[in-house]
Amino acid sequence: VGVPKTIDNDVPMFDQTFGFDTACTEAAKAVDSAYVEACCNANCIGLVKLMGRHCGFVAMNAVLSARNVDICLLPEMEIDLEKVLQHTEHLMRTKGHAVIVVAEGCGDTLIQSGGSLDAGGNKILADVGPWLKDTITARFKELALPLSIKYIDPTYMIRSVPANSFDSSYCSVLGQMAVNG
């Protein structure tokens, strides 16, 4: 009996993988926290790195749920860094704050990782969150614009919370169907 394990919701032929709903709920909380930080501090960007090595389903659904994100960067997108930086500058000049969400898979699209593998055989991705924070900070320093970035990486908080009621029920059904057909 096999039931695929991933909360990234990236298994073909499955409408939804277990843990995905819980992950999106927790990710949206991190995005909301970034929004509060950005709005409550002068010239502030709330930057959130969310999980998603090869797909941005968690990031995308958290952004859609939170409804207060200005820029969402997903590994499936072709991203023009200069346009991202220009739009970030525009947001800060016009709104005075911004919320940016980046999926971890952009660590292999925005920047190139070294290609080494972890103990599980997965490619080790470059850490896109701190890199993006440093890149935005450097641009604003060049322009002599004031900026504060509040960086949030809730990866382990998202992975370690108990399943919500939907995922608990879903897992019960998956388990019963896997055993009993």
Image (cartoon, rainbow, N blue to C red):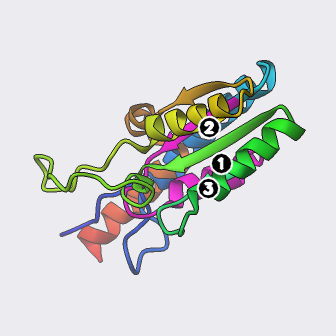
- Element type where label 1 sits in the image: helix
- Magenta includes 14? no
Mark 3 near mark 2, Cβ–Cβ under 8 Å?
Answer: no
Q: CA distance from mark 2 to mark 1?
A: 8 Å
Compared with residue 119, is residue 145 higher up or lower down, i.e. above or below? above
Query: Which mark, residue 82?
Result: 3
Query: Which mark, residue 139?
Result: 2
Residue drawn 36% across and 57% down? 108
- Element type where label 2 sits in the image: helix
Instruction: Work out whether residue 70 can be spotted.
Output: no
- Element type where label 3 sits in the image: helix
Given this view, does label 2 or label 1 mark the residue nearer the observer?
2
**Residue 72 placement, left or right of 96:** left
**Residue 27 placement, left or right of 93:** left
**Residue 116 placement, left or right of 97:** left
Q: Residues within 10 Å of mark 2 (few under 14, many from 20)?
A: some
Query: Which residue is at the front of the view, 114 or 154?
Result: 114
Mark 2 near mark 1, Cβ–Cβ under 8 Å?
Answer: yes
Residue numbers of the magenta segment? 45-70
- In the rendered image, residue 38, in percent from the top left (x then y), is placed at 73, 28
Mark 1 near mark 3, Cβ–Cβ under 8 Å?
Answer: yes
Q: Which residue is mark 1?
A: 85
Q: CA distance from mark 3 to mark 2?
A: 10 Å
Q: Amino acid at mark 2?
A: Arg
| Circle nearer the N terminus (2, 1) | 1
- In the rendered image, residue 70, in percent from the top left (x then y), is placed at 74, 48
Compared with residue 57, is residue 71 higher up or lower down, i.e. above or below? above
**Considering the image in quadrants, where does the N terminus appear?**
bottom left
Instruction: Work out whether residue 2 can be spotted.
Output: yes
| Circle nearer the N terminus (3, 2) | 3
Q: CA distance from mark 1 to mark 3?
A: 5 Å
Residue placed farthest to the bottom in the image? 13
